[in-house]
Structures are given as structure tokens and as C-alpha cells.
Amino acid sequence: MKAAILLTGDEITKGVVKDSNGGYLSEKLTALGFEVQSIVIVPDRKEFIEREISNALDKADLLLITGGLGSTFDDITLQTVADFLGKELIYDSEYHSSLSKSFEERYAREAPAGLKRQSFVIQDSIQLANPSGSARGAYIREDNKEIVILPGPPVEMEAVFREALKFITLPPPSYSRTIGFVDLTEPEVEEFTEQMLSEFPSVKFVTRVRYFSGPTVILSSDNEQILEEICSLFTRRWKKYVYTTTGEELVQAVVKELKARKLSVSVAESCSGGRLSALLTSVSGVSDVFPGAIVSYSNDVKMSLLKVNEDTLNRHGAVSE
């Protein structure tokens, strides 16, 4: 089965916001057994959105659309999809009342009129709850094609996508494995990957690079035993450079290993501004191995809390090998 992804938003096409939704959705769809045909980004313009809906549905069974479900003038996705399908937008007064009540309880002032924009539903669509925000998603089935509309903010998009999976028609069962490498570059892995491609032509290979670790190779097939064999071959070839064959993130593997060895880790950061600490604390249960961190941005904090020698700072500066 084939899928397409349509990302809407002037903030993306103008470079104000960097897209992460396309990569997340394509990886999830691939793991589910879909063949992703396209990822297209368009501004909040009705004619562009309609054109790409038409293009996507010509070649795909499933279309995922993100963005344009908010309460401002440029949030036009629902109206555009409704017009494209020849369906009505129906006002949901109960949802509008709940949005207004929630706003007034949180901010102690009258709800803005713009919230009404988020209270419309496309005729014959299934509403997808948004546990992380106010913009609901929608699932529509039309002439053996499926359309899923998701919010733009990544946290909300991921939450609503999980709801959508209750309704999306999935391809026949398939299997997926993700091999993650650390301290290797993509060109180093490429030759062996091409060799595997020629030896296992029935298996789909997708590669990508994570900036904080290294390349990953994503495998998919309807034969789980073949995937196990390929993972074994990669592991035998690269040994210590492989940190996962099941798709876990590097930080998850590190925390798991710390727990197994009954070790802990603390962090002293400066220019990274707490990002390494944030990465560690994104893992559930990390408190067992992570007591805390210091973000020592100023020299005074470096000297007082981390006992960095003042003479060292004077001679070499704060940013120095």
C-alpha cells in the first residue's frame, strides 16, 4: 500500500519553522509497511493544497496532511479538504463550548472568538482526539482512499497520529528492523549496505543520519527471519559500532546500559545550554542513573561549582580543547 504526506504552512515554506513531521511520519509509515510516495510542503494557499491533494490521491491509498487546524485566519486546511471532497463543514457547538470553558478556566478571561475555527468538522469524517492540544484531527474515507488530517505542532501531531492508527487500513503484516551505528560515517557503511542490497533484493533498505550519533539502516520485509539474518551480518561486520538493531535511540541504549552496570552519569554543560541533560531526561526511568546536572554558562559558575581553575580560564578561555 502507498502513502503520501502533505505538510502545510507558510512558516515552513519561509524557513521560520524547520519541519520534523515529515521525517517522523515517513519513518512510522515505513515501519508499518507503507511505501511512502512523496513528502510535499506547501504554503497556506488553497490552490496549492488542493493541487497536492489531487496529486497525492492519484498515486497513494493514504494521504496524511499536517497543519492548518488552528484558530487564525491562515488555518484553512479543513475548509480546503471539505471543498475538494465536495463536503460541508459542520459547526460543533458542544466542542466550541468546551474549548471556551477550558480557555476561561486557564486564563481567567473571556475566550477569543477565533476558537470557533477549531469547532468545525468535515461532513462524514471521524474526529481524532488531541490529548496534547485543542485542534482535533480528522479521518476520512472516500472512494477507497483515506485522508488523515493532523495538527502541525509535532507533539500534537504525534498524539493525534496515534489516534488515527485506530482507523487507518494497514498493509498486510510486515516486519521492520532499524540498525543504529555510532562513531561511523555514512560512506563507511555504504559499501556493505550495497552488498546487502544485492544479496537480499526482496528487502527494502532506507538509510538516514542522526547528527548526534551516526547513520541508521532501516530494513523492512514480510520475512522476519531474513531481517534477523541481515542484522546479524551487520553486527558481525561492525561489532562495537552497532548500538541497536531494534530501533531504540542512542540515549535509550546508554541509559539501559548504565542501569545494567549499576552506574550513574552526571553532566556539566556550558555552550550546549542544558541540551544534553534534556536528552537524558527524555528517557523514562532515567532518574535511577541521572542525579542531575550543572549548566555552567558563566566563568563564575565554572569556577565556583565546577572548580575550574581561574588561571586556566584566563590563559585558554572558556571555549578551548
Image (spheres, rainbow, N blue to C red):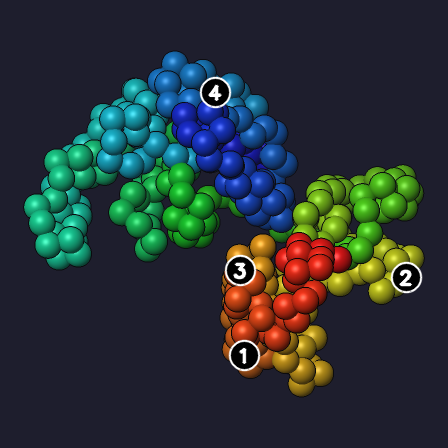
- Residue type for callout 3: Tyr
Q: Which residue is identified by label 1? A: 291
Instruction: Tell me which label, 4 or 3, sits earlier in the chain.
Output: 4
The answer to whether residue 232 is above or below residue 144 is below
Determine crowd level at label 2: few under 14, some 14-19, many 20+ residues with C-alpha closer than 10 A.
Answer: few
Foreground mark, 4 or 3, reads 3
- C-alpha separation, residue under disc 3 versus residue under disc 2: 43 Å
Tell me whether circle 3 and circle 1 mark residues in contact (CB < 8 Å): no
- Residue type for callout 2: Arg
Q: Which residue is identified by label 2? A: 236
Q: Which residue is identified by label 3? A: 297
* Position of residue 98 measured from the top left corner of the image (x, y, whole percent): 15, 50
* Position of residue 195 measured from the top left corner of the image (x, y, whole percent): 91, 43
| Quadrant housing the C terminus | bottom right
* Position of residue 240 measured from the top left corner of the image (x, y, whole percent): 85, 64
- C-alpha separation, residue under disc 2 versus residue under disc 1: 36 Å
Instruction: Tell me which label, 2 or 4, sits earlier in the chain.
Output: 4
Left or right, 140 with respect to 112, comes to right
Residue drawn at (35%, 18%) of the image: 46
Determine crowd level at label 4: few under 14, some 14-19, many 20+ residues with C-alpha closer than 10 A.
Answer: some
Q: Secondary structure at mark 1?
A: loop
Tell me whether circle 1 and circle 4 mark residues in contact (CB < 8 Å): no
Can residue 238 be seen from the camera position used here?
A: yes
Residue drawn at (87%, 45%) of the image: 188
* Position of residue 54 measured from the top left corner of the image (x, y, whole percent): 46, 19
